Amino acid sequence: MSTQYFVVGSGSIGRRHHENLKTLGAEVHLLGWRGLDMATLEALIGGAESAAMVIATATQIRLELITLCGRLGVPFFVEKPLAFRRNELDQIFRAAMPVADRSMVGFMMRYHPAFRALIEEPVAHPYGFHMEIGHDVRQWRQNWRFGDSYASRQEGGGVLLDLCHELDMAQCLFPKVTLQAVNCIGHADFPGVDFTTQVTLTQSGGPAGTVAMDYLSPKSLRRLALRGREEVLDLDLLGPAWVRASDESETNRSWEFDRNDMFLGIMDDFMALVEGRAVSNNPLMPRFDRVYESCALIAQAWEARSFHGEIEGGFA
């Protein structure tokens, strides 16, 4: 029985998933959200002998699609962040229960080779960490204006939601981290939208650290630093390469890396879940029923944002 995959959302990430599903041999249909009504979508999915959905819409458009999937018994892959308010997040998890163990959330950084290596070879006795991701959002996407995008919306926009993978990685490294503070800088032209955000996290009996994101860096960067009692580690996730050092030695390591390999890896595992095949050996596979803590941390952080001033510059 051949499964038909329906990608809902025809923006850049939807098109990427569509192409990757084709590369992986799937029968796939790309559907733009604008002009698509739920009755038509239900008829398309209900008419397939076996169906799965990829949800690549704006964050605000999650609950109704996942509710449809849960009601029809259709597994889904949904882009991050799942929701930016805890009450809606809990509604989504309840709606998804019938298919949660066959569905996934798009935390594709869990398929980054250097991050996987760090999970397999953790820094012992960590006491501190810092994660940072930054880029000039105006240079990031071609033929794109920030002011026209989902990221510029007061409800569901901003850098914390756009670049929330680092919060998921912090949760993977330090389960049950506790949110302490979320400090942001905004922009006068986009009220309520964070352009640079620093999140402070702690783990009971463990390390304290920060996760920083911004739309402003003139040079793209993505870094992770861990400090332990026996060694320190500095990881450049764009390289990717790391340096691990102790009082006695220093080790350098690098990886061959194509960014799309992460998207292919996570989609291949989703297809395996849908089709009843063996998944990869990735212990971090973000199956829907196993990622509530990360999703809740992101929503909690967004709701806890505190603004401390504004930047200037043209982003419209």
Image: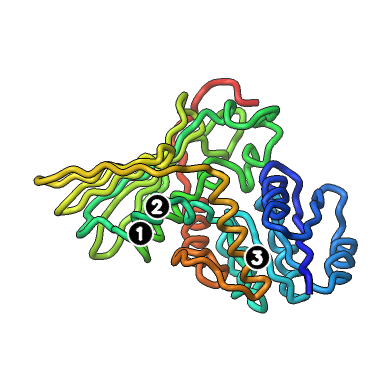
Q: Which mark is drawn over residue 271?
A: 3
Which amino acid is tagged 3?
A: Met
Contact between labelled residues 1 and 2, with CB atoms less than 8 Å apart: yes
Which amino acid is tagged 2?
A: Phe
Q: Secondary structure at mark 1?
A: helix
Whether residue 304 is visible: no
Distance Cα–Cα, label 1 vs label 3: 24 Å
Q: Which mark is drawn over residue 115?
A: 2
Q: Please identify the quarter of the rendering in which residue 151 is found.
A: top right
Which amino acid is tagged 1?
A: Ile
Side (left or right) of 239 relative to 263: left
Side (left or right) of 25 relative to 117: right
Identify the residue shown where x is 40% and y is 41%: 240
Of residues 73 and 151, the one drawn nearer to the viewer in this rendering: 73
Q: Which mark is drawn over residue 304?
A: none
Q: Quadrant of the C terminus?
A: top right
Give x and y (percent) for residue 175.
Answer: 37, 65
Q: Secondary structure at mark 3?
A: helix
Identify the residue shown where x is 81% and y is 55%: 29
Distance Cα–Cα, label 2 vs label 1: 6 Å
